[in-house]
Structure formats: C-alpha cells, structure tokens
Image: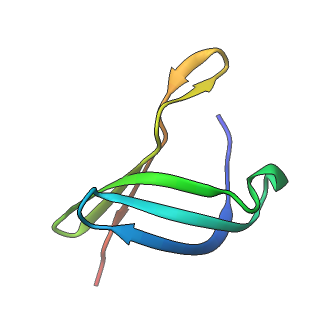
C-alpha cells in the first residue's frame, strides 16, 4: 500500500527484543524527531522487524520487514 523510508540512529534492547529507531529524516516529515519501536527476531541468517499494531484504512495492520544475510 505504499513506501516508507527514514534514517537515523538506533539502539538495540536484547533483553526485550526490540529496537528503537531515532528518526532524523524521513519521507514523512511528521516522523522526524520521533522514536520508532520495532520488535525483532534474529534467526540464523534472517532478521525480521515488526511494528506495533496500527490503523491503516480503518483496519488493524502490522508492518513486517525481513532481511537475509548473504555472502
């Protein structure tokens, strides 16, 4: 349903399995200066980030981003 992009620093909380992204710049200016919390799962060569639930077009949604290490 779209695209989002942002950059900034981050902090990993290994005990509670979440990452805090400190947004410095974004395609969405209202995100700048915010902290975005993402739950993470690290399994083998894969990292999966999941957003907390949010409303999208009037429905409950969850964003999922997954990376795979290569090489």
In the shown orientation, is residue 2 left or right of residue 70? right
Question: Percent position (x, y) of residue 20?
Answer: 49, 62
The structure residue drawn at horizontal position 38% and vertical position 70%, both measured from the top left corner, is 12
Q: Which residue is drawn at 60% across and 58% down?
A: 35
Look at 64% across and 73% down and name the residue there: 8
- The number of numbered discs placed on residues in the rendered structure image is 0
Q: Nearer the viewer, residue 23 or 44?
A: 23
Q: Is residue 46 above or below residue 62?
A: below
Q: Front-most of 61 and 10?
A: 10
Q: Nearer the viewer, residue 11 or 46?
A: 11
Q: Position of residue 66 (x, y in %)?
A: 38, 56
Picture quadrant of residue 43:
bottom left
Quarter of the rendering containing residue 17: bottom left
Where residue 45 appears, as percent x and y from the top left, is 22, 70
26 is higher (above) or lower (below) than 51: below
Taking the image as shown, residue 3 lies to the left or right of residue 39, namely: right
| Scheme of image coloration | rainbow
> Does 33 appear above or below 8?
above
Split into 4 quadrants, where in the image is the C terminus? bottom left
Q: Residue placed farthest to the bottom in the image?
A: 71
Image quadrant for the N terminus? top right
Q: Residue furthest right?
A: 29
- Quadrant of the rendered image containing residue 6: bottom right
Where does residue 41 sit, x and y in percent of width and height? 26, 56
Relative to residue 64, is residue 16 drawn left or right? left
| Farthest residue, direction left | 44
Q: In this image, 64 relative to 4: left or right?
A: left
């Amino acid at each position: 349903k779209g695209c989002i992009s942002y950059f900034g620093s981050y902090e990993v909380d290994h005990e509670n399995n979440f990452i805090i992204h400190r947004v410095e710049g974004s395609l969405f200016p209202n995100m700048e200066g915010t902290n975005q919390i993402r739950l993470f799962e690290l399994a083998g060569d894969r990292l999966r980030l999941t957003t907390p639930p949010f409303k999208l077009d009037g429905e409950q949604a969850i964003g999922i981003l997954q990376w795979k290490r290569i090489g």
